[in-house]
Image: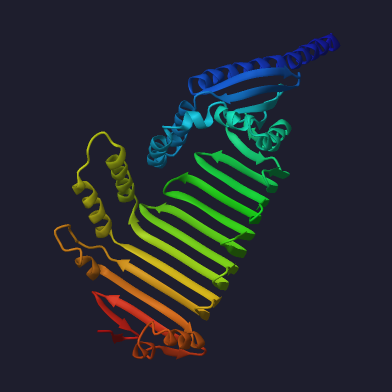
Amino acid sequence: MFKTKYLVISAVVVAALGVTPLIVSQQVDRTIEANNVIFEKNGFKHELLSKSGYLSGVRTFSLEVVDAKKARDFLLALLVAKNAQYKLFAESLKVETDAGINDAFNGLKFKGEMTNSNLLPSDVKVSLSLAQLPTSMQEEIVNNKAASDAVLPLLARGVLAVDMTFSSDQKLKTIKFKDIKEEIKAEGTTLNIDTEKQQLSLNERGGVVQGALGVAKQNLGLNGEMFMLKSELKDFIYNFTYKDDLNNKGDINIGKYALEINDEYTDVKFDLGSLKLISSVEDVKKDLQIKTDFTMDNVVLLDSTDDAKLEKFFAKLFLRGLNADTIKKVQADYNTLLLGTTPIEDKVLIDDFVALVNHGVKVDLGIAFKGLSSEMMKLKDVSVDTTLEIAQNTYNDTQSPLALVGLLDITSKVKVHKDDRATLEEMELMTAEDFALGKAEGDFFIYELSMKKGVISVNGKVIQ
């Protein structure tokens, strides 16, 4: 009896598992059909070419742009829906591209493949490759054998391709561009492309998007009879976290970059040893805080007129004190001024500016560079650290703009190597008396500058 019972239960489980792929496959088909309706309403043509697989479903399809203007508006609407601050950009782009966008993009076609599990909820993988150029470009290359020979084989091989991963709820998680290693020759010109690991990953949780954009290698070369361009990028990575316009952060790292351009008029070489940028924007209890740290190492620029080298450059910024609600109002009023159907008075924007001034602000800015050399100037070690502050005040728009100067409280510390001071004195950027105000500290001279209520002093001495 018990054995019979277990056999029946087992049979039901097996039957259910056997039917599950069919049910999931049908659900996927319904989702695709629903998306097709959206595509067709918004300038795309989607066609299912084949379907196979049982436990895993594989579908091939094509996606073509048939009305680029509708497609543009659809994609921009999605962007603005998630990021309202891009409304101005979206409207501007519509105006700029309205005239020729259909001629430029209609007929653009991609071939794709979608793979999903029909057994359990899982990520969906989608591959897209460029299969057909826009109609206008097709017409141009039909009668151009060199262009046809260069472009059509690339399309046939699916060289320009991207792999994407979507979560089970259709949210984009990763984008990975296909590695390219191609040499393309046309009309006496050779284009070399060599890329590795170009990808974008996204992860959204609780309305916060975390992502990373990376490139292990991206080398481009263009050679002609009297022209040469070479661009080499190595180890680029951009990590970011985005909640909204006033709460986000990111960091950029570049391992190395080199650019070389040569023609009958130009001979330029640029090398960057490394670059790092860290930035953040944060609303801290209605206090908007912006931070940035930037460093560059071993920068070299060589051209036919001058050679410049820089061992290290550093800059930092810390801004706080701006009222976050006022910033949001300024942004909204500015967008209304440019895009709104209801006119906005100039007095509104003036009041916004006065509100920002009244609330006050504090900014720390630091800049330093070492080992700067060029034909015009050689500097060993110079740094400038400045703090600018406007305290809370009662300034109003009936006062003269010059009254703003009286609100500024600026302090700055300039540190100059003794050899650099001699160089700057020779350039006569300031009088000898001004340079003499510096305080000697080891191999450096220190200049502590301040401006309070319009009065400027250096190391305690008022400058008339």
Q: Position of residue 23 (x, y in %)?
A: 67, 15
> How many numbered marks are there?
0
90 with respect to 128 (left or right): left
Quadrant that contains the C terminus = bottom left
Is 371 on the left or on the right of 120, as rendered? left
Taking the spot 28% from the left edge, 69% from the top edge, the residue there is 408
Task: Depth check: give the residue in front, 246 or 163.
Answer: 163
242 to the left or right of 152: left
Is 78 left or right of 262, judged from the image as shown? left
Q: How is the image coloured?
A: rainbow
Q: Could you say which is closer to the camera, residue 230 or residue 339?
A: 230
Locate the N terminus and report the quarter of the image it occupies: top right
Residue 68 appearing in the image: yes
Residue 222 against residue 209 in the figure, above or below: below
Image coordinates of residue 349 in percent, x first then y, are 24, 49
User: Can residue 170 be seen?
Assistant: no
Choose between 214 and 154: the one closer to the eye.
154
Question: Looking at the picture, how far across and down is residue 301, in whole percent?
Answer: 58, 68
Which residue is painted at 26% across and 33% down in the image? 341
In the picture, residue 395 is in which quadrant? bottom left
**Residue at horizontal 46 percent and vertical 60 percent from the top:** 291
* Residue 100 picture location, percent across and down: 45, 32
